[in-house]
Every structure is written in C-alpha cells, then in structure tokens.
C-alpha cells in the first residue's frame, strides 16, 4: 500500500530554488571546449606508472582518510608542510568543507562573475553569500569593496578565484595581500588555473594565517574524471577542516593516480606550455574577427562576445559538433567561453565561428 507523499514539501525551505547541476548532453559533439578540461589524455609514462601500481595494490580496504602518501608528495611539490595540506574529492568538495567548517550561520564574500560553486555551496552549508561584483570591462576585483565586506563581523570566508573563471584575469599579490591583512576572515584563493598563469599566493602563507590556497588535478593535470583537489593553508586551519570532512572522501585509486601524475610533473610542464601557446594564438585570432571582443586570459579558456546573440553562435557551433560554454547572469549577458583545446580543435572552432559570423542574420 502506498500513501501520498511529497518529498518536495520536506525539502529545505531556504533552497527551494536550487536546481540540480546539469551538463549539456554528451551526444552530438566531437570537439569539447566547454568545461576547461585538459585536451590531453594520460601521458604514457603516467599510464604505465598507474598500471604498475595496480598490479601490487588492492582495494578491499578503505582508503587512507588523510591521503598521507599523496600529501607527502604534494608537500614536496609545493614546499608547504604536510600538516598544512588537505586533499579532497575535487576542489569542489573542499569548497563545501570550508563552508561547513567556517561558514554556516555566517556570511561568505563572493566576487561575481566567478565560479558559481562558491555561492551554491555557501547556500547548501547555510552561509549567506555576499556579492561584491567585479568592475568594468576588465572584470577587475573591487578590492575596496571586498575589504569592506570582508571586515563585517559576520563574514567568515572570502572567495577569490585567480586566475578567475570565467573572466580569465588574475588578481595581483599586492591586492590579495591588501585583503588578507584587512580582515580576520579566511581568504580562499582558488588557484584552479594557476599552472597556466597569474602569480601564486603561496608565498603569502608565511605572513597571513588566514590564507587558504585551493588547487586541483582537474585542469593542468588532466584528471577531471578522477576528482582530486587539495588545499594549502596553515596547520591550524587544516586541523579544523579535518573535524568536519568526510572520512573517506578521496578514493584509493584517485590517490595513487594523482601521485603518478605528480611524479611526472615535467611531462605536464610541456603540455601546459603547449596550451599557453595555443591560448595566445586563439586570442590573437579571436581579436581579428570583426566585432568580436575577446578578453585576455591567464588560464586555459577565453571569454568572448560577438555581435550576434550568443545562443545563435552557440547553436551554429553545436550543429558543427563543437561544444563551448554559454554564460549569462549579471555582467555576462551575451558572453561565451571557449576552452583552449588542441591545435586542430581550436582551428575548427575558429573556422566555424567565422562561418557563424558571416552567415549570421541571414540564417534565421
Ligand atoms: C574547474 C574549477 C575547479 C575544479 O574543481 P574540481 O572539483 O577540483 O574538479 C575549482 N575552481 C574553479 C574556479 C574551477 O574553474
């Protein structure tokens, strides 16, 4: 027997407008330039390393909750002591962990347009997002505005993405330092794209105990499918986070794969250099297209706008098997974001974009 039951009525009242995270269909495209992933598969040496590990490892036991081997490798890679490193199931999870540990019941400063997960996770954790919009055509951080919001007694966290997704610009160390020294909130600098440009905030960790740096294996290391992120902070901060994190947040396979990738950092250096070269080329080409406004980028993607409605461009590209990201919301109406792919992918994208701009207006 059954009775009428509406789980929607039980769902949290404060999150009634929340929608599930969705990605565009995996169906009809061959060139995927929408999610800032690496276009490169596993380097052969990393694949071999992982296979070698698999022959001697078992997965019948729970993973190490603190991912100590990976953390030791990350300590060597970054120069940060192991006690100041926390690994997570993607940096997405670490953003939520930060908010659950420090944000609930307080405020979290965000600087839109930026990565949407800070706001979503703030709300899920029961922290109030406070927006300090970026300014002008260059989407520069409103440093004075951030300092004013960060100084409010209810503010627990400040999220600054640098280089910023989706605008591509980085925040200078001087500006980050101005924010860090002005407040007693945690200042989280999301460096998901640091390998591609911008200055790392890490040197500031010695002077500012309220700094948290977020990194990921999803972009430059090309391991988005394995979900590995990490944060770098003072040991006192990491100790608090360990109190609320899920015990087995990072699975054993992903731990060993991330270690294999780190071991071959030199290989990734070459891939990163190739992506940066392609980025500059793609930017130059976009700027040459009539009416197109492209934003300079320190990351592995480029934000741009064309004289045509964004939907129209997006649709034309999709009809030709190319998926890019359509943006929207305050400050981003009419904008598109393209991830830097391999050379032939970028060529094809440019060719089809040119085509859309030539036929646009007639093809409606
Ligand atoms: C892609 C991205 C991440 C990465 O998230 P993971 O959960 O590690 O895959 C984090 N922050 C920003 C700004 C990003 O664009």
Image: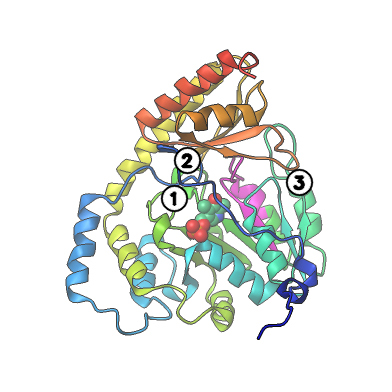
Image quadrant where residue 127 sits: bottom right
Q: Could you tell which of marks 1 and 3 lies nearer the N-terminus?
A: 3
**Residue 219 circle label:** 1
**Residue 133 circle label:** 3
Residue at image point 21% right, 61% down: 49
Mark 1 CB lies closer than 8 A to ligand 1: yes
Q: Nearer the viewer, residue 184 or 114?
A: 114
Mark 2 falls on what kind of element?
loop
Rendered position, 294 above or below 158: above
Q: Between marks 1 and 2, how big is the CA–CA gap?
A: 8 Å
Give the quadrant of the N terminus.
Answer: bottom right
Mark 1 falls on what kind of element?
loop
How far across and how far down the image is residue 282, in percent?
46, 27
Residue at image point 30% right, 68% down: 256
Q: Which residues are magenta?
A: 157-177
Residue at image point 63% right, 59% down: 20
Rendered position, 237 above or below 163: below
Q: Residues within 10 Å of mark 3 (few under 14, many from 20)?
A: some
Q: Could you tell which of marks 3 and 2 lies nearer the N-terminus?
A: 3
Q: Between marks 3 and 2, how big is the CA–CA gap?
A: 23 Å
**Residue 300 circle label:** 2
Q: Answer yes or no: do the residues labelled 1 and 3 have beta carbons within 8 Å?
A: no
Residue at image point 71% right, 75% down: 7
Q: Nearer the viewer, mark 1 or mark 3?
A: 1
How far across and how far down the image is residue 325, in percent?
56, 39
Q: Residues within 10 Å of mark 1 (few under 14, many from 20)?
A: many
* Residue 227 forms part of the magenta stretch: no
How far across and how far down the image is residue 195, in percent?
44, 48
């Amino acid at each position: 027997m059954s009775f009428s039951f509406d789980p929607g009525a039980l769902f949290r009242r404060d999150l009634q407008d929340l929608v599930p995270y969705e990605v565009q269909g995996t169906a009809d495209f061959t060139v995927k330039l929408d999610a800032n992933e690496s276009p490169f598969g596993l380097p052969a040496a990393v694949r071999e390393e992982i296979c070698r590990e698999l022959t001697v490892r078992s997965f019948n036991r729970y993973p190490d909750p603190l991912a100590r081997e990976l953390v030791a490798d990350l300590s060597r890679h970054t120069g940060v002591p192991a006690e100041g490193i926390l690994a997570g199931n993607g940096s997405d999870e670490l953003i939520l962990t930060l908010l659950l540990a420090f944000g609930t019941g307080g405020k979290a400063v965000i600087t839109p347009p930026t990565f949407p997960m800070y706001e979503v996770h703030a709300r899920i954790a029961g922290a109030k997002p406070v927006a300090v919009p970026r300014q002008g055509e260059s989407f520069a951080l409103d440093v004075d505005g951030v300092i004013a919001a960060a100084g409010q007694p209810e503010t627990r966290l400040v999220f600054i993405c640098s280089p910023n997704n989706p605008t591509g610009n980085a925040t200078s160390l001087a500006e980050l330092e101005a924010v860090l020294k002005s407040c007693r909130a945690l200042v989280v600098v999301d460096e998901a794209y640091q390998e591609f440009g911008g200055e790392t905030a890490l040197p500031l960790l010695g002077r500012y105990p309220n700094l948290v740096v977020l990194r990921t294996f999803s972009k430059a290391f090309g391991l988005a499918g394995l979900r590995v992120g990490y944060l770098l902070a003072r040991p006192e901060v990491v100790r608090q986070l360990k109190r609320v994190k899920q015990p087995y947040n990072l699975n054993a396979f992903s731990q060993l794969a991330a270690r294999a990738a780190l071991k071959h950092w030199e290989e990734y250096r070459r891939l990163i250099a190739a992506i940066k070269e392609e980025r500059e080329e793609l930017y130059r080409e976009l700027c040459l297209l009539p009416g197109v406004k492209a934003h300079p980028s320190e990351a592995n993607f480029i934000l741009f706008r064309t004289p045509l409605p964004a939907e129209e461009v997006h649709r034309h590209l999709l009809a030709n098997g190319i998926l890019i990201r359509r943006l929207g919301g305050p400050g981003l109406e009419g904008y598109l974001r393209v991830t830097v792919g391999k050379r032939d992918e970028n060529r094809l994208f440019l060719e089809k974009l040119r085509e859309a701009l030539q036929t646009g207006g007639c093809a409606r």
